[in-house]
Amino acid sequence: MDGKLALNYSSYLSDINIGSISYARLISRRFGTIHGSINYLDYGSFIGADEEGNETGEFGANDISVSLGYALNLPWTNLFFGANLKFINSNIDSFSSVGIAGDVGVFYYSPYKNYTFTLVARNFGTQIKTFNGTREKLPFKVALGASYKLNYVPLKWYLAIDNLQKWDISVPNPSEQSTDLEGNTTNEEISFLNNALRHFVIGAELFPESAINIRAGYNFRRAAELKLQEVRTFGGVSFGFGIKMNKFKFNYAYSKYHSASNSSTFSLQIDLDQR
């Protein structure tokens, strides 16, 4: 990532827009890498109303975070340690909240091995200023990731195990509810295996080291929570591609959430050191 500038934009659900810009610079192999980023999330416009339901006009909501970080290859090992500190500002109409959070991660990589491992803890921190006096918890998460590149086939596999900080992440799907003749409603029963699978995201990349590559992925939790009875929605499926041209690298990803919703993510990476 040395000397690389990355620009990202995602057209998310319900006219939500997400964007980021980041940059990294290697100081030296001994002193590591510094990096920074700005992330922005715009929720769009909403119609306000008073307690009696009378409309009071439109208002907006958005989040922005600024982060600074540092990464270092631990001496005489194939382990890389990284951390960053994030300053977060959130606005809803005339209300605002300020928080501070951090991320830490450990990455294993060897140029002589076909596999990598990553362990990341995100969003440990606190609110400094609350919206209305009620202190809220930050969405702390722990995730484990791995990749494996096949020897004789231009294919790389990816695996992520998300939400390790919490075992039961199951949410009953409303479309799986059943109602008896007396009007009693029974929610979906989620098994041990079903809940376990919801922690997993899998993916594959074809031609990972070529100028053009193709990617696909599957999110078990998203698929389970957004499926519809007797309807094939392809929820949880994602696919995309990457194109590298000289100092530029363009990536696109399409993610399917539901039969009526999807998101597109665009990424442009520029190697500022390459002539």
Image: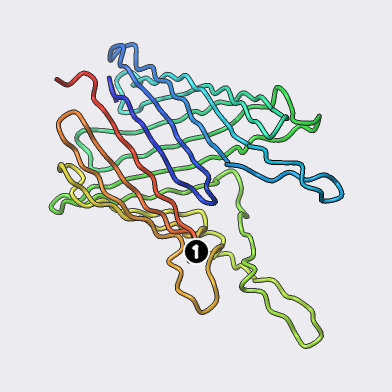
- The colouring scheme, among rainbow, by chain, secondary structure or one colour, is rainbow
Residue 268 left/right relative to 44: left
How many numbered discs? 1
Image position, residue 115 (x, y; %): 28, 42
Residue at image point 76% right, 42% down? 56
Residue 77's place in the image compared with 176, above or below, is above
Q: Residues within 10 Å of mark 1 (few under 14, many from 20)?
A: few
Residue at image point 68% right, 34% down? 92
Q: Quadrant of residue 229?
A: bottom right
Residue 215's place in the image compared with 193, above or below, is above
Q: Nearer the viewer, residue 170 or 146?
A: 170
Image position, residue 254 (x, y; %): 37, 53
Kindly identify which residue carries mark 1: 260
Residue at image point 45% right, 60% down? 236
Residue at image point 15% right, 41% down? 211
Judged from the image, the secondary structure of the residue bearing numbered disc 1 is loop
Residue 181's place in the image compared with 192, above or below, is below
Residue 187 left/right relative to 259: right
Q: Quadrant of residue 99?
A: top right
Farthest-out residue, right: 52
Image position, residue 147 (x, y; %): 31, 45
Image position, residue 195 (x, y; %): 57, 61
* Image quadrant where one finds the C terminus: top left
Q: Nearer the viewer, residue 138 or 76?
A: 138
Residue 165 left/right relative to 202: right
Which kind of residue does numbered mark 1 sit on? Ala
